[in-house]
Amino acid sequence: MNTEIPSHGQPIDRFAAAISGEVYESVHSSSAIKSDKRQALLAGDYPNPKHLREIAGQIKQHTLESLDKYLPQAVESLERNGVRVHFAANGEEARQIIGSLLAARGAKKVVKSKSMATEEIHLNDYLAANGVDCIETDLGEFIVQIDGDHPSHIVTPIIHKNRRQIAKSFEKHGLGAYNDDPETITRRARKFMRDKYMSADAGITGANFVVAETGRLVLVTNEGNSRFSLAAPKLHIALVGIEKLVPSDRDLSVFLNLLVRSATGQQFTAYTEFISGPHASGQPSGPEEMHVVFLDNGRSDILAGDCREILRCIRCGACLNICPVYRQASGHAYRSVYPGPIGAVLSPLLAGEKFPSLADLPKASSLCGACNDACPVNIPIPDLLLRLRDKGKREHAPLASRGVPPMGGFAGLASQPALWKGALLAGHVMNYFPVEWVPVPPLSKWTAQRTLPEFRGGEFRKWWKQRRQR
Amino acid sequence: MATCLCDAFFDDVARATVEVLEYLGCEVEFPEGQTCCGQPAFNSGDWPAARKVLRHLVDTFKGGEPIIVPSGSCAAMLYHGSLLAFEHETDLPEVEKVGQRTWEVLDFIVSGLGVKQWEGACEKKMAFHSSCHLRGSNSAEAARLLLGSLRGAEILPFKEQEQCCGFGGTFSVSFPAISADMGLLKLQNIREVKPDLLVAADMSCLMHLRGLSEKQGNPVPVRHAIQVLRDALVAEGKLR
Amino acid sequence: MSSKQQILNKVRQALSDKQNRAPYPVYDTAEYVAKPRVEGGSAEQVFRRNFAAVHGIVVGDFEELKAVLAKQPLKKGCCDPALTAKLQGLHIEWESEFNRNKFDEYDIGVTFASGAVAETGSLMLKDRATADRLSALAPWVHVAVLKRSEIYLTLPEALQRLGDDPNVILVTGPSKTADVEGILIEGVHGPGVQIAWLVD
């Protein structure tokens, strides 16, 4: 992933200014279409979608704030179901656990179903370095993998690519002569992948939800790739963030309905799997052995802080699709696994001690609040962005302050009415005002594309006085 | 509360607010010590500076009367943002009280005063930009209701209506490229439906869109909703 | 200390100063049922409509099944042993065990469904009732044999029927993707044709 930071300006703004028209078009149109579908579907199906989002948020918040109860309960339920449970404090430990589970069965060939948690710990690179052949089976993730690229969206990883680019990659990697017909591309991937599934020793997945009460792991996909990854191989390893729990089966109707509508604008995914252990006795296919690796990797620290609401996230990507900044900048601008509004909060937090290296992300928002309106679990993303801006300033992270006008002078002026009024009348306000209203250097960037209105400081006060005197 | 933008640039919007409220029978006060809501500092992450400004605001607006603001953004700062900034402060209750008294002016007219219809005419096709900080309040519906009730008025729907204009205060300075592109996209979507007038309930958005379009050499005519309502009363001879 | 203990301790500590923990909200799962999708007839009628909406095909008897399958070039199939007798006369060479070495030769798989969800237009397949997961997945055409009496109207009702089967899957139409420019393509890794065969 490109983590280079330009020497001046906002990295995300610079990135956005440099992306090609082709990428902008792909990202903007696809995001806008999906946002519209989501809104139309929710409004058509429910009289009050906002209320449903609020309830979902409350269930998640409750689960998080009782994680000390639900996490041990989930472990107990999973073990009762015959699942072996592991805990990884960080990415390094998670990679090692997965590596040794594979080694124990001599597994050299792995099929992987799309999972953000495995992206987060950069599992593919680790497995490749350890001689394990790991193939991404989701079409979008597969294309990202053969391109040596990174997903730019948490649900639609190749939102930044068009069919011509994909056709070129397929041609380059021996998947047939150039053909940019989406159906042909899909059929070629189908053909290529089938041998991989059938010869794989293990399937690795994430989980959309884990039910604490029953130990059910829920996976939603459309392509059938996770089902295949769990039909042919004999070993199943699931990497799951500790925040993925929900209390009971009944809550799944809340989350499945909202997740799918929010993520893809469908009412339900083609495949919704409820897995509570290795295959049934008598079932010839499916894993004989199942492991769940619970991943902390900074989550318990987030739980302890004042941004814990971010852990409600169910990774639907609706906030990316609706975000005007994401639509302009695309996902790679965020220099992290999680892009968009959710990423602008989650990535700096997950970075832990490396927070300063991503301290500019929370600024990449006009605080318009569209993300909060779209979020199926009602995460107050703008509030969390603001909290992280405050944190960045308090901790003197250079990227937090870069390009942001200092506010000390303004605050002094705005808390002393005599000075304020004097400044308004004398026009001296120009020297202290927040720069977006002042024609001095940082503002030259503003005025390069915009005019300023006529300065009329004190005019209202004059009118008011005259009116009172009458 | 006039807001610092109206104090410095858009005096006629503050004036229209006073005139409309007085027409509706309200007694309007203008505490002269007022300055700003503190949002620029708050959004920049300089919360100590924001608290300093807000404490001054709390001092200036003592009493129990409703505080009316011709800006959804400044209003939201008082009833929402300030609570975050004062979360761990002992004077949170005073700040909270100010927030509870605060109304965006159109929301106040409709929900506070119960006015559901407006007198007069505005024979224009309007594009109404629902400014982002009206989210979570009734202001956007209130504005649409009142504007739509004017004789001859037509409110045109346009593409990607819920999208931000790209201003975002200091955001437009820190992120000049993204901010301008957001604004230009908004203008493009608005121009597509060929309105006579672009209306909003926040001068910050209108300043941004007007500024961008003027630089393009094709300025869109803009008006705050409260000005449209005031102008209708003047045309009817109800106001001088 | 093991990572498990460490993480559980950290979680406990993270919440230790939390005085008023967010309560579990009072709600009714019925609020999450999409009313417009479950209206207009019996569970079967609703299922038929919603399964068709996700491009699934419902057949009500053998003759109908025969007609639908006649449109597909089908040579070899794999079916649940209990169904072999019922599937004669289709000009398909049936095997009652899925042979992994010949996985690409099967054009069609026939297995039992354990229920359906009318609201979402989904078939419910359970591990214990499915002869082989691969039969329901690898061939281009999958036929699920569904008892009319096991069609549940809403998703919350169906979720109460998950039971103790280690693997339950809701199949909502053919497998699909929209990864390439958002264009919907059916038949990615799983079946491109998904049929529900209703029986009494």
Image: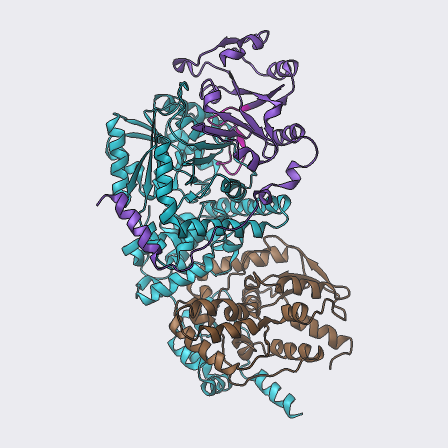
- Residue A240 in percent (x, y) is at 36, 40
| Chain letter for the cyan part | A
Residue bounds of the magenta highlight = C176-193
Which corner quadrant of the image does residue B237 belong to?
Answer: bottom right
Q: Residue at x 58, y 59 (%)?
A: B187
Compared across the picture, whether B215 is left or right of A443 comes to right
Compared across the picture, whether B141 is left or right of A248 comes to right
- Residue A290 in percent (x, y) is at 34, 30
Above or below: residue C35 compared with residue B174? above
- Residue A126 in percent (x, y) is at 26, 37
Task: Say which of A168 and C173 sits in front.
Answer: C173
On-image quarter of the C terminus of chain B = bottom right
Q: Is there any visible trace of residue A340 in the rendered image? A: no
Whether the magenta-drawn stretch holds residue C88 is answered as: no
Q: Main secondary structure of the magenta part?
A: loop
Whether the magenta-drawn stretch holds residue C185 is answered as: yes
- Residue A140 in percent (x, y) is at 43, 36
| Chain letter for the purple part | C
